[in-house]
Amino acid sequence: MPEIAPGAFHYSGFLDAGAQARLARDIAEVIAQAPLFVSRMPKSGLPMSVRMTNCGPLGWMSDRDGGYRYEPAHPETGAPWPPMPRMLLDIWAELTGYPKPPEACLINVYSDEAKMGLHQDRDEADFNAPILSLSLGADCRFRLGGPKRADRTIAFTLSGGDALVLSGPARRSFHGVDRILPSILTPLPAPLMGVGARVNVTMRRVT
Ligand code: MD6
Ligand code: FE
């Protein structure tokens, strides 16, 4: 039932309201230590519409000259990323069963107008490890395709509290966020209120 395409698992309502509030508190603490920043597209230098930060040993970022990559420290403060909250490590173990812990956790913050173009997560050395995402706040229209950009896609609603695992054949599938759906009725839990409309965290193995 949660397998929406081979290797792609959508756990609708995985986090109840209490768990969403605890995750929001953990993410607010990460943001307090590692402020949100704006990554830029390689070459063009155009800013992405999401703001981001990271926790764990490595963090994902992008800028005009260095391109997409993982770094051990925040691009603006120079400080190492804060540790990954226990709750995220536990959920990784529960949903992926992968024998090693995630090395990177990217936190993306969407305004009502933000989106994320169709992309593959391929800056990691290990494609055998799944990627696990958790969402908070507003619903979004999420699009999932196949290993080639031109492959047929499906679209579905990803809501606050949902988990999504891309593993096996879906690990290399193109995916993106078409748009954030109206957020008045689905605000981010208290400690994140006002930061944006939607927060998504993705945990990965990198090396
Ligand atoms: C987002 N998610 O939900 C963007 N990537 O805002 C992703 O890019 C993503 O949800 C890999 C695996 C799961 C994901
Ligand atoms: Fe992705």
Image (cartoon, rainbow, N blue to C red):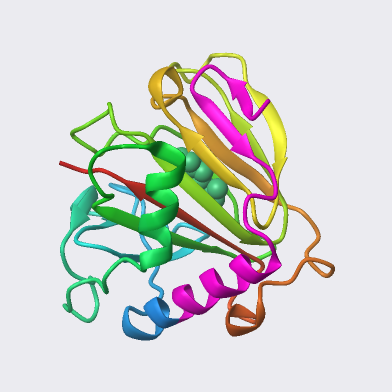
Magenta-highlighted residues: 1-28
- The reply, left or right, for residue 7 in relation to residue 99 is right
Q: Is residue 198 above or below residue 193?
A: above
Q: Name the side, left or right, on which 130 lies relative to 11.
A: left
Image quarter of the C terminus:
top left
Count the labels in the image: 0
Residue at figure coordinates x 48%, y 20% from the top left: 149
Residue 145: x %, y % from top left: 56, 22
23 within the magenta span: yes
Residue 94: percent from left, percent from top = 44, 45
Asked if residue 171 lies left or right of residue 118, the reply is left
Q: Nearer the viewer, residue 106 or 128?
A: 128
Q: Nearer the viewer, residue 78 or 189?
A: 189
- The quadrant in which residue 184 appears is bottom right
Q: Is residue 188 above or below residue 150?
A: below
Does residue 117 appear in this view?
A: no
Query: 42 or 138, which lies in front?
Result: 138
Identity of the residue drawn at 53% across and 53% down? 134
Quadrant housing the N terminus: top right
Is residue 39 visible in the rendered image? The answer is yes
Q: Residue furthest right?
A: 185
Residue displayed at 31% across by 66% down: 84
Depth check: give the residue in front, 178 or 163: 163
**Residue occupying the point 68% across, 61% down:** 16
Image location (x, y in percent) of residue 161: 65, 56
- The location of residue 172, given as percent across then percent down, is 39, 25
Q: Is residue 92 magenta?
A: no
